[in-house]
Image: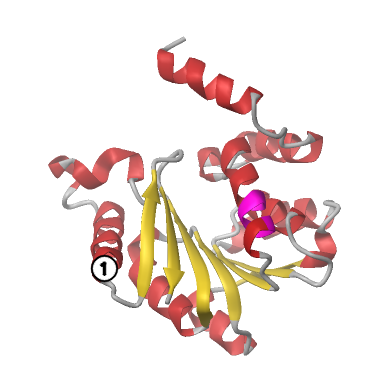
Amino acid sequence: MTETEILDQYILQHSDPEGDYLHQLYRATHIHTVHGRMASGHLQGRLLKMFVHMIRPKNILEIGTFSGYSAICMAEGLDDDGKVWTFEINDEMEDFTRSWIEGSQVADKIHFMIGDANQEAPKLGITFDMVFLDGDKRTYVKSYEMSMSILRSGGFILADNTLWDGHVVDAAYDKDRQTSGIEHFNDLIAQDERVERVILPLRDGLTIIRKL
């Protein structure tokens, strides 16, 4: 094992366990989907739950449900009256994801919808306290602006994959549309006077943004 892998194991061993259900979901995601690594996973999942505990949001918007792992993690941290409203644009994921969400102990806190969050979320008429942005990287800027329009002042946006395997600093990927989408998003956030922001080097990069 490399030093990084050893440290990763150490971190996981000294953090809260993900639990049997999430472990099974993570494994099933890797077996039954093409891009299993897109699931949040143990460490990021525990961070999401902890963050929800810290800020105690009533309504969370998730853009990009994938297999439901992150939605379940966030719902675990909610108070009894809290809700996660999560959108997945890929309808081929619906049966797999819905079965895992409905089988979880927090199913009553999760509203899972198939559709484009950029179009559908504003129609809910909800002012959100927190947004987890983990959808199409090519439309991160559009998703960010939409999220800002329905996020309360003092609310948070957590944006995943903002280092994109290091491609954001590799000129070889300048013409890649997903890398370009992340780069434009990062540049916008860095200059946006409406927010405070910090990038954490967790997994593939996690940006925490606070709306002023």
Q: Nearer the viewer, residue 55 or 83?
A: 55
Residue 129, picture quadrant: bottom right
Instruction: Determine the residue positioned at 69% across, 51% down.
Output: 73
Q: Position of residue 161 (x, y in %)?
A: 41, 49
Image quadrant containing the C terminus: bottom left
Region in magenta = 49-53
Q: Nearer the viewer, residue 149 or 79?
A: 79
- Dominant SS type (magenta): helix
Q: Position of residue 149 (x, y in %)?
A: 46, 84
Instruction: Determine the residue positioned at 45% across, 38% down.
Output: 203
Q: Is residue 142 visible?
A: yes
**Vertical arrangement, residue 22 with respect to residue 137, above or below:** above
Q: Is residue 67 visible?
A: no
Q: Position of residue 61 (x, y in %)?
A: 60, 70
**Vertical arrangement, residue 183 with respect to residue 9, above or below:** below
Lateral position of residue 133 relative to residue 18, left or right: left
Instruction: Determine the residue positioned at 23% across, 51% down.
Output: 176
As helix, strand or loop, the secondary structure at mark 1 comes to helix
**Vertical arrangement, residue 39 with respect to residue 108, above or below:** above
Instruction: Determine the residue positioned at 76% across, 54% down.
Output: 76
Q: Amino acid at mark 1?
A: Leu
Q: Nearer the viewer, residue 206 or 40?
A: 206
Instruction: Give the residue number, with chain letter if any, for mark 1.
Output: 188
Residue 132, picture quadrant: bottom right
Residue 193, picture quadrant: bottom left
